[in-house]
């Protein structure tokens, strides 16, 4: 496996298919029962870690590297903490406005929900950019393209064209530098 920048492997294990023990100072674990087949960021603060699932072994080494850097980008960027904070803000308008104006409460709640959605989408793009800056722009783009546009986009993911476009723009900027 070609991962070198910020990646440590479990001591004494040399197999290219093994999961590294950490990436960019973030602990990595393999879990066969992971709900996310590839990888996801879990936990908060210093206890945050990356979990890779069973589909990990079907990725190329470059795609594995891009995936690890993407998830590390979520942890280093403290995206989970921001989402929790924004989710808590979702309830403030409901508690403050419900006794007075029901419609104002609904409008404020929807506004906060939309804010969380945009924040989450931008965090996903930020994690892609983190992986790209670590040298995994091309594998990240190939990985996103290999999955193709999802039939229904979860609210926290940017649409397929926006995500691919951001990575393509990054690659083009790198060529001109």
Image (tube, rainbow, N blue to C red):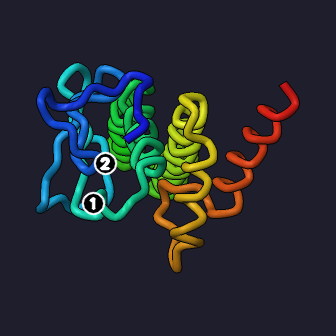
Classify residue 87 by image quadrant: top left
Q: How many residues crowd around disc 2 within 10 Å: few (fewer than 14), some, or many (20 or more)?
A: many
- Residue 177, percent from left and from top: 84, 24
Q: Residue at x 61, y 42 (%)?
A: 137
Q: Residue at x 68, y 46 (%)?
A: 167
Q: Residue at x 40, y 24 (%)?
A: 76
The residue where tag 2 is placed is: 40
Residue 86 located left or right of residue 114: left
Residue 112 appears in the rendering: no
Residue 2 appears in the rendering: yes
Residue 23 located left or right of residue 119: left
Q: Residue at x 18, y 25 (%)?
A: 47
SS label for mark 1: loop
How far apart marks 2 and 1 lie (CA) works out to 7 Å
Quadrant that contains the N terminus: top left
The residue where tag 1 is placed is: 36
Disc number at residue 120?
none
- Residue 20, percent from left and from top: 25, 36
Classify residue 3 by image quadrant: top left
- Cβ atoms under marks 2 and 1 closer than 8 Å: yes
Q: Is residue 58 above or below residue 139?
A: below
- Residue 88, percent from left and from top: 33, 38
SS label for mark 2: strand
């Amino acid at each position: 496996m070609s991962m070198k920048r910020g990646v440590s492997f479990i001591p004494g294990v040399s197999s290219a298919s093994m999961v590294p023990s950490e990436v960019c100072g973030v602990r990595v674990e393999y879990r066969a029962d992971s709900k996310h087949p590839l990888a996801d960021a879990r936990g908060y603060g210093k206890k945050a870690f990356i979990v890779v699932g069973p589909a990990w072994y079907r990725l190329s080494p470059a795609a594995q590297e891009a995936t690890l850097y993407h998830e590390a980008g979520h942890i280093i960027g403290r995206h989970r903490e921001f989402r929790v904070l924004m989710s808590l803000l979702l309830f403030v308008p409901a508690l403050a406005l419900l006794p007075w104006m029901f419609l104002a409460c609904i409008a404020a709640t929807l506004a906060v929900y939309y804010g969380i959605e945009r924040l989450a989408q931008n965090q996903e793009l930020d994690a892609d950019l983190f992986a790209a800056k670590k040298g995994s722009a091309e594998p990240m783009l190939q990985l996103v393209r290999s999955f193709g546009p999802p039939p229904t986009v979860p609210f926290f993911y940017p649409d397929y064209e926006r995500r691919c476009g951001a990575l393509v723009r990054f690659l083009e900027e790198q060529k001109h530098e």
